[in-house]
Every structure is written in structure tokens, then in C-alpha cells.
């Protein structure tokens, strides 16, 4: 079970890293700093790689979490979906939508 927890933390960490990269890239675009833009792009790519690696066991982790408190999973899905929409991260948005649907069953 601790393996699933680590995988879930990686997925969450990847989402946070993506949002950070999105912000860095936006700052770079506004200020004209290519270093900030490149740093943001690198962070976003690293985040995508981390999320892909972490998602290999996500279905099992979600099932365990849903069994322990489905309303919590649905609430987490609402927040994650909104963060995905705001940041432009399609994967985060989709993950949130899946949690919302799974948590409400």
C-alpha cells in the first residue's frame, strides 16, 4: 500500500511541477526572458514525464482511496479538474474528471 501512496504523491508532485513550469513560462513570455521560458518548458516536460511514470498504478490507488472515502475523492477531483483548466494541463483536468465520476458512485 505504501507503493501506491508514493505513486499518488508522484502524480500530485508532477501536477504541481507542471503548474510551476506554466507560471515560469508565462513570466518569461511577459518579460521576454528566454531563460525563464526555457526553464518553464523544462519543468513542464519533467512534470509530464513524472506523471506518466506515476500513473502506471493510479487505477489501483484510486480504487483503494475510493473504498476508504468516495466523497473525498470526488472533492479532490473537483479541485484537480479546476486546477487543470486554469493551468492548461489537459492531463490534470482529465484526472480530476475521472476522480469526480469515480468518487460520486
Image (cartoon, helix red, strand yellow):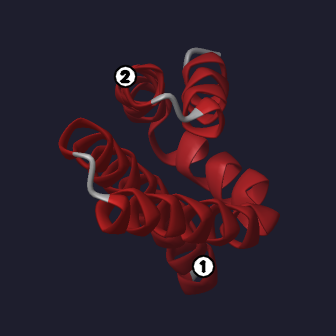
Considering depth in this image, is 59 or 48 the residue closer to the camera?
Answer: 48
Query: SS for tag 1?
Result: loop
Residue located 81% across and 66% down the image: 56
Q: Which of 36 and 100 is in front in this view?
A: 36
Residue 88: image location, x then y, percent: 50, 28
* Residue 96 located left or right of residue 32: right
- Residue highlighted by disc 1: 1
Q: In which quarter of the image is the C terminus?
A: top right
Q: Is the residue 97 above or below the residue 65 in the image?
A: above
Q: Which structural element holds mark 2?
A: helix
Q: Which residue is drawn at 55% across and 37% down?
A: 92
Splitting the image into 4 quarters, where does residue 35 fall? bottom left
Q: Which of marks 1 and 2 is in front?
A: 2
Q: Name the residue under label 2.
A: 86
The quadrant where residue 1 appears: bottom right
Horizontal placement of 88 versus 40: left or right? right
Rendered location of residue 98, percent (x, y): 67, 27
- Image x and y of residue 36, in percent: 30, 62
Would you call the spot at circle 2 few (<14 residues within 10 Å), some (14-19), or many (20 or more)? few
Amino acid at each position: 500500500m505504501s507503493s501506491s501512496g508514493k505513486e499518488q504523491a508522484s502524480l500530485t508532485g508532477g501536477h504541481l511541477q507542471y503548474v510551476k513550469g506554466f507560471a515560469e513560462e508565462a513570466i518569461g513570455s511577459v518579460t521576454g526572458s528566454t531563460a525563464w521560458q526555457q526553464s518553464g518548458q523544462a519543468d513542464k516536460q519533467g512534470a509530464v514525464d513524472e506523471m506518466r511514470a506515476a500513473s502506471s498504478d493510479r487505477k489501483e490507488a484510486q480504487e483503494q482511496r475510493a473504498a476508504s472515502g468516495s466523497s473525498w475523492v470526488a472533492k479532490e477531483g473537483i479541485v484537480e479538474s479546476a486546477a487543470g483548466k486554469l493551468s492548461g494541463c489537459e492531463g490534470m483536468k482529465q484526472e480530476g474528471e475521472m476522480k469526480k465520476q469515480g468518487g460520486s458512485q
